[in-house]
Image (cartoon, helix red, strand yellow):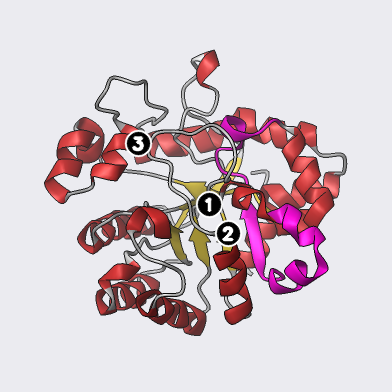
Amino acid sequence: MSGIIDCHVHLYSPEVAADPRGWAAARGELHWAELVAPPDGRPSLQGWVTVDQLLRDMDEAGVERVVLQGWYWESQNTCAEQNRWYAEWAAAHPDRISWFATLQPAAGQAAVEELRRAAGEGALGAGELSPAAQGWFLREEAFLAVAETARDLRLPFLFHVNEVLGRQRPGRRFDRLEDFQWLAATFPDLRLILAHWGGLIPFFELNRAVRKDLRNVFYDTAASPLLYDARIYQAVADAVGADKILFGTDYPLRLYPKSGEPPGFARMVEEVRSSLAEESARAAILGGNARRLLFG
């Protein structure tokens, strides 16, 4: 294996793939359904794969390990359901699959208890979380209790972050970017991963005061081909250093919809390799940083 680690992958049970809208309606997860199975007939970028297909696609691209990220569900019960899938799949393939627990911090103590339970089952962190989509704020008491628990357990958080400029997409919701700086400064020992290039927060690190606050913040590359041109890899590496970037695809999203190709890892791996000038940066982003942060 080449040592590639994809730190941002999603996976759903066959029941979900068979009827995503029906499954979501039964659980009140209408925001998720709008994104993955639009009711107005818009084409969806969501792909559906089994665990076996995931492993085949990993082998084809030389991906050693993936880290499953949960969704930012509206219900804590749905979070717990997905966590059980992830614990089962990771236990069946411990050398290939790791996972983060998904939580609904607005659930209060139930979210804290779920985080502790998931950590006991092997979860490496908590995510993907989205305050705006889940209906809470980073400075709320309920979330701060979850953050304190994660800090005490030495578990990182991964947040979904949207860029504030650009094309308005259905279901797109925004958090205040300054709240992520506040969280990092308030919990300096809490490791944070801001997905999708952190909504371009890395470039604010060119401000020395911001850079000091964000010293324990990392950025993943999830869904990058859908959001930015390939210059983003070198640009962010130049701004914050390659050691703060984690490779993530958002698999099984269809990252190159115009080509019609199915979900996979290989093309984005090659995009990373061809976009960075230094081999040391390629090695760090494609696996070294995740290995240090999550498995060191």
- Would you place residue 245 above or below residue 265 in this image? below
Near mark 1 (Cα within 10 A), the count class, few <14, some 14-19 or many ≥20, is many
Q: Amino acid at mark 3?
A: Leu
Amino acid type, mark 1 = Val
Q: Which residue is mark 2?
A: 177
Where is the N terminus found, in terms of image quarters? top right
C-beta proximity under 8 Å, tags 2 and 1: yes
Q: Nearer the viewer, residue 165 or 110?
A: 165
Mark toward the viewer: 2 or 1: 2
From the top left corner, tell me how far across and down residue 247 is, in percent.
Answer: 63, 47
- Residue 35: numbered disc: 3
> Residue at point 59% right, 40% down?
165
Give SS at disc 3. helix
- Residue at 46 percent of width and 77 percent of height: 147
What residue range appears in magenta?
A: 202-229
Q: Earlier in the sequence, mark 3 or mark 2?
A: 3
State the image coordinates of residue 265 (x, y, percent, origin top left).
56, 34
Q: Is residue 241 visible?
A: no
Direction from residue 39 to residue 64 in the image, left or right: right
Amino acid type indicated by mark 2: Leu
- Check the image and report above or below for 187 versus 104: below
Q: CA distance from mark 2 to mark 1?
A: 8 Å
Read off the residue under disc 1. Answer: 161
